[in-house]
Amino acid sequence: EAQVTQNPRYLITVTGKKLTVTCSQNMNHEYMSWYRQDPGLGLRQIYYSMNVEVTDKGDVPEGYKVSRKEKRNFPLILESPSPNQTSLYFCASSPGLSNQPQHFGDGTRLSIL
Amino acid sequence: AQTVTQSQPEMSVQEAETVTLSCTYDTSESNYYLFWYKQPPSRQMILVIRQEAYKQQNATENRFSVNFQKAAKSFSLKISDSQLGDTAMYFCAFMKHKGGSEKLVFGKGTKLTVNP
């Protein structure tokens, strides 16, 4: 089954404790992206990757890091999480062709205390 | 930069009736894609319908159809014969035809409640 898998689905942690949210896709997609969803703001892009070792900032990259060492994986790293990063996070992937829709993971709810 | 505006934060409709969700966008691009995504309480992001800007014909998917007015930069979603399972947050989104980032620009969403 074609899917984008995020882990964990839920996480409650404390300020400053490094965390990683993993994202993996099994569709051999070129393009992967991270979004955060906040009430009243919709979804905003954090980082994206067009291919292995190619990443770039989206609209709200501050406080986040990403890496793309393998085509299927695109982890989101919060080196020193802060309460304003409490949010719902989505990973998405697509073949990299604009006429193909993006596939979303099921989301990760992060709470930073 | 592109912006997407959904002017209705919340809407409600009776089961079996028709409802229209509004979306306007701002762009200087001539070729682009527009999407409606549905987010039920399970939080999944589900693609409802997609429209390519260079196509004049409005997209339809079963009970879902769009009214795409390119000159007015409007992209409304019509849901016919509303069902209880249509209760969800609906997001309108824009993507440039090219440009590399494949970034979806989302509106803030419309919360739709279908009442029995």
Image: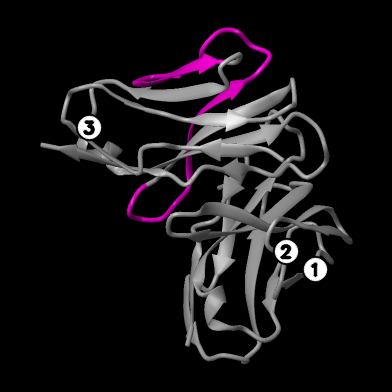
Residue drawn where x is 38% and y is 19% of the image: B62
Left or right side of A93 for B60: left
| Residue type at numbered disc 2 | Phe
**Residue B43 location, x and y as percent?**
41, 55
| Secondary structure at numbered mark 1 | loop
**Mark 2 lies on residue:** A74
| Residue type at numbered disc 3 | Gln
**Residue A96 location, x and y as percent?**
77, 40
Give the camera-side residue of B56 and A91: B56
- Magenta residues (range): B40-69
For marks 1 and 2, the one nearer the N-term is 1
Numbered-mark total: 3
State which quadrant residue B73 falls in. top right
Q: CA distance from mark 3 to mark 1?
A: 42 Å
State which quadrant residue B16 falls in. top left
**Residue B69 location, x and y as percent?**
54, 14
| Residue type at numbered disc 1 | Ser
Q: CA distance from mark 1 to mark 2?
A: 6 Å
| Secondary structure at numbered mark 3 | loop
Q: Quadrant of the N terminus of chain B?
A: top right
**Mark 1 lies on residue:** A67
Mark 3, other Cα within 10 Å: few <14 / some 14–19 / many ≥20: some
Residue at the extreme left:
B116
Q: Is residue A2 visible?
A: no
Residue drawn where x is 27% and y is 42% of the image: B87
The subunit letter for the residue under badge 2 reads A
**Mark 3 lies on residue:** B83
Q: Quadrant of the C terminus of chain B?
A: top left
